Image (cartoon, grey):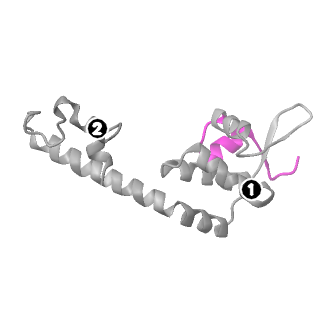
Amino acid sequence: MPGSMLTIGEFAERAGVSASALRFYERRGLIRSVRTSGNQRRFQRSELRRVAFIRTAQNVGLSLAEIIDALDDLPQSRTPTTSDWKKLSRTWHDRLSHQIRLLEKLRDELTDCIGCGCLSLNRCRLNNPEDVLATRGPGPRILLED
């Protein structure tokens, strides 16, 4: 094996993820390994960029399906380049902006409610007596609606 190949343990340590996560990513087709004659996994160092891409995308809230779609769109299943990242980030810009607005609203709404200390559902602006918000759709309507 060439010196640029890493065992699963070495790769996991360098990538900052568990070996089980790497096996999961590999089963899902997100990363690739080669097998030795003893059937042990070996990873090219270039696969580290794919794992960094996956972890970054997950950390900003993208689903595994979105990440798979993005990596599947790359020519010949190659590692993402800077140009690819820019293209993908433009694609995800609106989705991430919406997520940021939702997180800010959640932070601000919960701070107001929890911070007041009133503990009174009668005065709480997040209160939903008789579930009147059910007519506006499922889930936490006050927080989800703009």
Rendered residue at 55%/67% (across/down): 90
The CA distance from mark 2 to mark 1 is: 51 Å
Badge 1 marks a residue whose secondary structure is loop
Badge 2 marks a residue whose secondary structure is helix
Q: In which quarter of the image is the C terminus?
A: bottom left
Crowdedness near tag 1: few (<14), some (14–19) or many (≥20) residues, C-alpha within 10 Å: few
User: Which residue in the structure is indicated by mark 1?
Assistant: 46
Examine the image and state in which quarter residue 10 appears. top right
Locate residue 4 relative to residue 104 in the image: left or right.
Answer: right
Number of marks in the image? Answer: 2
Which of pointers 2 and 1 indicates the residue nearer the eye? 2
Q: In this view, does 120 lie above or below 141?
A: above
Rendered residue at 9%/38% (across/down): 117
**Observer-nearest residue: 119 or 98?**
98
**Observer-nearest residue: 124 or 4?**
124
Q: Residue 2: percent from the left, percent from the top?
A: 87, 51
Mark 2 touching mark 1, by CB under 8 A?
Answer: no
**Observer-nearest residue: 38 or 64?**
64
In magenta segment, residue 62: no
Q: Residue 60: percent from the left, percent from the top?
A: 48, 52
Q: Is residue 121 above or below residue 87?
A: above
Q: Residue 18: percent from the left, percent from the top?
A: 61, 36
Q: Which amino acid does label 1 sit on?
A: Ser
User: Which residue in the structure is indicated by mark 2?
Assistant: 135
Q: Which amino acid does label 2 sit on?
A: Thr
As drawn, the label of residue 85 is none
Rendered residue at 69%/60% (across/down): 80
Q: What stretch is highlighted in magenta?
A: 1-19
Examine the image and state in which quarter residue 97 appears. bottom left
Rendered residue at 18%/29% (across/down): 130
**Observer-nearest residue: 48 or 94?**
94
